[in-house]
Amino acid sequence: MTKDHNARNRAARERLEALIARVGERDVVVDGGWTAAGLLAHLAFWDRLAVARLEKHLREGKPPIFATDEVTDLTNDAAMRQWRDTPPRVAGAQAREAAAAIDRLIETLPQDKLDGLKALGRSFLIDRSEHRKEHLDQIERALR
C-alpha cells in the first residue's frame, strides 16, 4: 500500500496555514452558525483527538476507540460555542499545531500499523485531508 495520504495531509495542512494567514484576526462568519475561528478550533480539537486515539492504540495495542456519529454530533454541538468564542489567532495557532502533530505521527507509522488501520475501514484515522478540506472550503467561501 502506498502512503498517498501523507501527501494529501501535507497539502491540506499547507492550505490550512495559508487560510489561517488570510483570516488573521478577523471575525469571519460562516454558514450554519459557525465562524472561521470556530471551524479552526473544531479542526484543532479533532486532530488532537486523533493524536490521542492513535497514541493510545500504539501504546496499548488495542483497536482504536471510535465514537458513533451521534456522539460526534453531540460533541460538535456541545463544543460549538466554546470554539466560536476562541479568538481567531488562538484558533489558528491551535489548528496549525494540531495538524502538524497528527501529520507527524501518521508519517511515522510503520506499514503494518497503517495496513491494520486501513483494514478497519476508517480512513479518517490516517487521511486527515478530507475533514480539513470540508471546513477550509467553508471558510474560503465566507472570505469571498
Image (cartoon, rainbow, N blue to C red):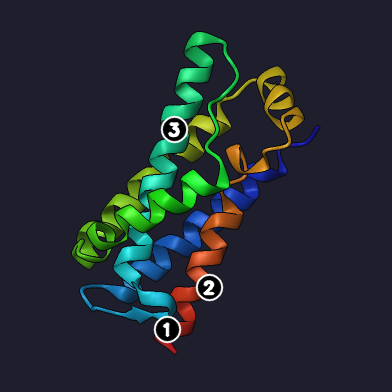
On the image, numbered disc 3 is attached to which residue? 51
| Residue shown at the point (30%, 60%) measured from the top left | 92
Amino acid tagged 1: Ala
Between disc 2 and disc 1, whose residue precedes?
2
Question: For residue 4, what is the image quadrant?
Answer: top right
Mark with earlier residue (3, 2): 3
- Residue situated furthest top in the rendering: 60
The image position of residue 86, as x and y in percent, is 21, 61
Vertical side of 110 occupied by 9: above or below: below
Left or right: 47, with 92 as reference point:
right
Which quadrant holds the N terminus? top right
State how far apart marks 1 and 3 are (Cα).
Answer: 29 Å
Viewed as shown, does residue 57 lie left or right of 77? right
Q: Nearer the viewer, residue 121 or 133?
A: 121
Residue tagged by mark 1?
A: 142
Q: Tell how many labels.
A: 3
Question: Dot 2, how many residues are within 10 Å of its Cα: few (below 14), some (14-19), or many (20+)?
Answer: few
CA distance for labels 2 and 1: 9 Å
Q: Residue furthest right?
A: 1
Q: Residue furthest bottom?
A: 144
Identify whether 88 is placed above or below 75: below
Residue contact between numbered discs 2 and 1, judged by CB atoms under 8 Å: no
Question: Which percent across, then down, holds residue 57?
Answer: 52, 19
Q: Nearer the viewer, residue 140 or 104?
A: 140
Q: Identify which amino acid the numbered label 3 is placed on.
A: Val
Which quarter of the picture shows residue 90?
bottom left
- What residue appears at the point 20 percent right and 73 percent down from the top-left corner? 25
Give the labeled residue for mark 2. Answer: 137
